[in-house]
Image (spheres, rainbow, N blue to C red):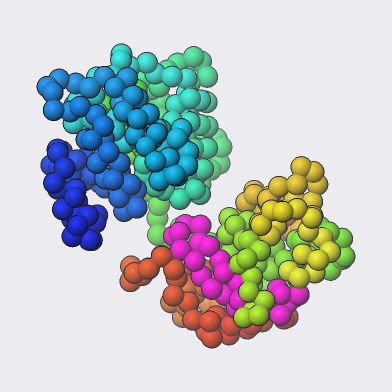
Amino acid sequence: MIDQIFKRADAVERQLAAPFAQSRSDYLAHCAAAGAKSTTLGNVARTLLAVVRYVELDRPGKVPLFELEDAAARWAAQDPGRRGGDAKWACQRFLRYASGWLRFAGRLEAPATVVPSYAALVVEFTDHMRSEMGWSEATVRSYRDRVAAFLGRCCRDKRTVAETSVSDIDRILSEKGAAGGHSRITLRNDAAALKAFFRYAERRGWCAPGLSASITTPRIYRDAGLPAGPSPDEVRRLLATTAGGSPADLRDRAVLLLLSAYGLRAGEVCALRLEDIDWEAETLRVRRSKTGGGSLFPLTRSLGEALLRYLREARPRRRRREIFLTLKAPVRPLHSTGISCIVRRRMRGIGVDRKRCAAHSLRHAFAQRLLDEGFSLRQIGDCLGHRSLAATTVYAKVGLVGLRQVADFDLEGLA
């Protein structure tokens, strides 16, 4: 496993020459099987080298937790600049990776398991997803919220997670689908979040083993829920609502153009920073929230003018680098929920109040327009930033010439 993580021969040799190489390699394979990304695996492997140097593992028996804490403090104190300048964060990382490995190897002497309150448990699970699994922030937030909602309902009668059974999970998911009117896709996402959570809970001894494997995922039928968005006429009317000169109109116009004419996700709009706009080259760099890569888009005249006017006349004077900020105090970067609220409010203003009229509906409308214009699925996938099996780099390989044609096909008419 080690030779799959590191490409340089000296790095592989250093890993294999250190003590307990086989045990560390087995643990890394376990982390990879659980879905950890390659960058996370590299961080774990490098930290475990420090663990074998700072923790006395040659003696028989299990290692008490306080020895790991002492070793973490000594390790973090050595060259703090190399540790990122944050000794507390370095200690936490050392403890997390060391305890994970030693627990996997059966060498960790932990105190009697005490299941914390579900709120504290969600916090720990969130940290596990972010630092150990290396999942995207969008996935971390989604899973955190879904698990918190489930536990808040399941444990509100002072029940612990250890008392949760498969029948409880099935009952809550069934009630959410039948009485709550949620779609199969929502239930599938809930089930995926719960499977990940209970898989981690089993490792920590918080619940009965095998619970995660017993969670059934609702079947999603092909083409049962094709994405739908507003019609081109509704998009034009939506943009027309921003024709005024108020700060909200100027900001919302730029936001709506990014959603409807570029097909960006709400999170990608929120992540845009001032340095992402290259005014001389007339390009816009977008960070892909799901794939972790980026795309370079042509900056069309209508969007450029909308952004320029917003930045000059409406954007609050703050040192924040995010482009889109709230207009009222406390001024802070817009969140994806705020982007969807803008779309819903403007949609209701033109008399469109259907169930799915959030920010993502404009992305669906964008894809449908490209399809109607005769663009290939490959071109549409590039524009939407979809992950491809043939992709070899973190940056989407998007041709500016083709994208300028895509972005300009009817953009001035929409604007």
Question: Residue 413, percent across and down?
Answer: 73, 80
Q: Nearer the viewer, residue 54 or 371?
A: 54
Question: Residue 231, percent across and down?
Answer: 66, 69
Compared across the picture, whether 171 is left or right of 274 comes to left
Residue 309 colored magenta? no
Q: Please, is residue 312 above or below residue 212 in the view?
A: below
Q: Is residue 263 visible?
A: no
Compared across the picture, whether 153 is left or right of 359 comes to left
Image quadrant occupied by the C terminus: bottom right
List the single residue furthest toward the front: 79
Residue placed at 70% from the left, 64% from the top?
A: 256
Q: Which of 80 and 194 is in front in this view?
A: 80
Q: Can residue 324 be seen in this view?
A: yes
Q: Please, is residue 206 above or below residue 195 in the view?
A: above
Residue 303 colored magenta? yes
Question: Residue 133, percent across and down?
Answer: 36, 44
Range of magenta residues:
283-306
Q: Please, is residue 18 above or below residue 160 in the view?
A: below
Residue placed at 13% from the left, 46% from the top?
A: 17
Residue placed at 71% from the left, 47% from the top?
A: 332
Question: Residue 100, percent across and down?
Answer: 29, 33
Q: Which of 110 and 218 is in front in this view?
A: 110
Compared across the picture, whether 404 is left or right of 5 comes to right
Residue placed at 60% from the left, 57% from the top?
A: 271
Residue 132 location, quadrant:
top left
Residue 204 location, quadrant:
top left
Q: Please, is residue 29 above or below residue 92 in the view?
A: below
List the single residue furthest toward the right: 245
Residue 347 location, quadrant:
bottom right
